[in-house]
Amino acid sequence: MKPIEIAPKIYWVGAVDWNIRDFHGYSTKAGTTYNAYLIVDKTVALIDTVKAPFADEMLERISHVIDPKKIDILISNHTEMDHSGGIPKIMHFIGQDKPLYCSKMGKKNLSMHFGDKYNFHAVEDGETLSLGSRSLTFLETKMLHWPDSMFSYCPEDKILFSSDAFGQHYAGPQRFDDEIGEAIMPHAKTYFANILLLYTPLIEKLLARVTQMGLEFSMILPDHGIMWRQDPGKIVAAYARWSRQEPKNKAVVAYDTMWNSTRIMAESIAEGLGQAGVHALPMHLRANDRSEVITQVMDAGLVVVGSPTLNNGLFPTVSDFLTYMKGLKPKNKIGAAFGSYGWSGEAPKILSSQLDEMGFDQPEAPLKVLYVPGPEAKKQCFEWGEKLGKILVDRLK
Ligand code: FEO
């Protein structure tokens, strides 16, 4: 794939990772891209690089536009290695003494990744760098999603180079929002749920700051996936909406099962939830990976978690999911715990205490069923689900 001219003398020179399926535990069924941008001006600037194995491919792409040795400065918006992994090769190629612009935390973090051998220029928040006919203003976006993260904004073209923000793990033939349309939004939502959910208070502050500064965007160019050139406001509005974490009339019933008893419970509970008018999704944790489940959790009003008792504790996949969910800090949820057991039956209580730690309100006591649910136990599960559903419906009124 050749470079793509996004605006006069601004080029996409990144790489497409078609077959990555696991991005540090986030299932990337559609692959991803590592977007890097070349601005050819009096000063030639490269914004971000790519994951290390794709560095040669990026250099080759750049060479369609300009001799890569003519790059004057490298700007690193973010230290995570899917964007910085190519730095050593790029710096070696363009010259180790060329300035490497980054945030103050970027300087610290890049040094810890690659040593302090580079000619770092740590920028101030709001600092502007002239490239000739264009300029770049750097905006610190600390903890969105690393301490080093920053945006680079070109006021002349109203283009935001937004690092991870507004990205999606998506590799396809399209590069722009107008080429893919609405089909990109589920990928953007999954990305938000898995990468940014825990930072929603900071996102709300950032969006308020952007509004206060009066920044306008003709394009938003993230470091992953589709670039927003037709309607950048759409993804900004979606971020504002997702950040509010408004609960919907939806319940996720996340569970695992040993001999189907907890599955039978989950499905009876989901039926009861449906009876109360709630859209219920029973999600087996070995059939749905954690990144899919957390995406559904993001706007659910109710999260019901089920586990059989295994060796006096939780089933391992349920522990995995709870660890993942805890880290992502979903808000404004009702929670509930259930599970089948044979003799000791600790799992529902453990689940309930973990949901408590996560700040989930639990209006109903945990439900447990001994061995295989018969007609009575199924009825009990149905009614428990219906009761929870009615509580959710009432709270959403
Ligand atoms: Fe795409 Fe935080 O790296």
Image (spheres, helix red, strand yellow):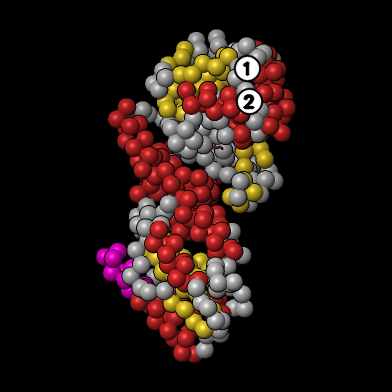
Is label 1 in a helix, a strand or a loop? loop
Q: What amino acid is labelled 2 in the image?
A: Phe
Q: Amino acid at mark 1?
A: Lys
In this orientation, which residue lies closer to the viewer: 332 or 166?
332
Q: Please identify the quadrant where the C terminus is shown.
A: bottom left
Disc 2 and disc 1 in contact, CB within 8 angstroms: yes
Give residue 281's position: percent from left, percent from top.
49, 68
| Residue positioned 39% across, 62% down in the render | 356
Residues rendered magenta in the picture: 388-397
Q: Position of residue 34 (x, y in %)?
A: 61, 35
Residue 227 vertical placement versus 306 (above, below): above
Asked if residue 390 lies in the magenta stretch, the reply is yes
**x 70%, y 23%: residue:** 89
User: Which residue matches tag 2?
Assistant: 114
Q: Quadrant of residue 18?
A: top right
Q: Nearer the viewer, residue 189 or 120?
A: 120
Residue at image position (34%, 37%) is: 205
The residue at 43%/31% (across/down) is: 141
Q: Is residue 276 visible?
A: no
Question: Which element is circle 2 on?
Answer: helix
Query: Which residue is identified by label 1?
Result: 117
Residue farthest to the left, as pictured: 397
Q: Is residue 111 magenta?
A: no
State the predominant SS element of the stretch in magenta.
Answer: helix
Mark 2 surroundings: few (<14), some (14-19) or many (≥20) residues within 10 A: few
Query: 367 and 3: which one is in front?
Result: 367
